[in-house]
Amino acid sequence: MIKYVFKRLLYMVIVFFLISFLVYCLFGLVPNDPAALEVEPLRDQLDPIAFEQVYQEARARMGLDDPLGIRYLRWLGLYPDVDSSVPSGVLQGNLGWSNIFKQDIIDVIRDPMKNTVRLNLMSTLITLMITIPIGILAAVKKNTAFDQSVQVVTIVGHSLPVYIIGLVCIYIFSVKLRWLPVGGMKTAGENLTGIAEMLDRAWHYILPLIVVVAANLGSMTRYVRAAMIDVLSMDYIRTARAKGLREKVVIYSHAWRNALLPVITQIISWFLKLFSGSVVVENTFSFNGMGALNVYALNSLDYELAMAIQLFFTMVSLLGLLLCDLAYGIVDPRVRVNK
């Protein structure tokens, strides 16, 4: 197991370097000049010659005239900084400087990262708590009225885009019933502290959670149902029933454990899609998360901040794939992860 994990971690490092280089190259192709953005406010205060000199000094200070490979290694932290003999990049915890927020990127993304992780972890737990029992029950009661009702509801839920679900939820819970806030992270004009602040923040989490869970119930429920139906048709399930085992033992000990293997792959891939899909939800509800911050950074031409956010999504994907491989060995001992 340890050898396998070490090998997977080595693969993750290689993939991380490849993806980070491709991301840096793609953003380097964008017609954007950080030095011009920095000195633009001085254009009206200086004559053209002095402004050009300040501009060239800014480019030299940022290392923009260096080759692409040198700039990438400097950004990553494998090459000394322009004004220092010591590397100071991503690997050292320095994600760069945000031209929009005028502060270190690590400080900019701290709160949005926490909000996005909380939202997606909570929605994942709630969705699995709902979809797994319903999917198993629909498979056990195949072709009954309950199963047909579940299929109709899940098809409708799977077909609706997440922004449509968000608008419908806003109309019902915020406009008509006035139970939940339309958006934001806290009540405007309130300076709450302690437990009151936590409750107010949780109140603003409810509607985005409802939308994310509702948007993913359909696909996950149908996948669990399909996996269970496939396993319940196997010969060893008929043998277990013929031996007189209780139906609960057959379903949860024999069938569900074997159905978990394909379901795990779907759960992990679906969990990774949640982070990319949170872009729509966070922008719909003005939720201070990584998705909304990524859109704001791109619209504001703050590409260094956008690259840091892309690295976050890359790390989430790589860790998710590692967890998926390790989960195979936990669910099914026949999967030898030590080889």
Image (cartoon, rainbow, N blue to C red):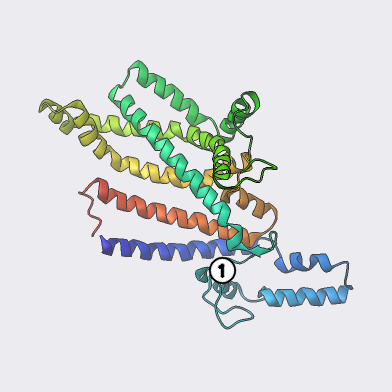
Q: Is residue 229 left or right of residue 194?
A: left
| Image quadrant assignment for residue 130 | top left
Residue that numbered label 1 is attached to? 94
**Residue 110 visible (yes or no):** yes
Please state the horizontal and vertical placement of residue 84, each as a whole percent of the image.
Answer: 60, 81
Q: Residue 286, how many percent across, how many down?
A: 64, 42
Labels in figure, total: 1
Which residue occupies the foreground of this view, 148 or 208?
A: 208
Where is residue 6 drawn, in percent x and y?
32, 65
Which residue lies at the image location 64% right of the left edge and 76% below the top edge?
A: 66
Please, what is the three-letter code of the amino acid marked with disc 1? Answer: Asn
- Which residue sits at x=48%, y=44%? 120
Above/below status of 134 relative to 338 = above
Q: Is residue 201 left or right of residue 125?
A: right
Query: Could you say whether the residue bearing mark 1 is in a helix, strand or loop?
Result: loop
Q: Quadrant of the N terminus?
A: bottom left
* Of the pair 66 and 91, the residue shown nearer to us: 91
**Which residue extends farthest left?**
243
* Residue in the picture at 36% in, 45% down: 265
Looking at the image, which residue is at 68% across and 41% down? 188
Residue 136 falls in image quadrant: top left
Where's residue 272, x and y in %? Answer: 45, 47
Q: State the residue lying farthest toward the top.
A: 145
Residue occupying the far bottom of the picture: 85
- Residue 279 located left or right of residue 317: right
Q: Is residue 123 left or right of 302 when viewed as pictured?
A: left
Q: Is residue 274 visible?
A: no
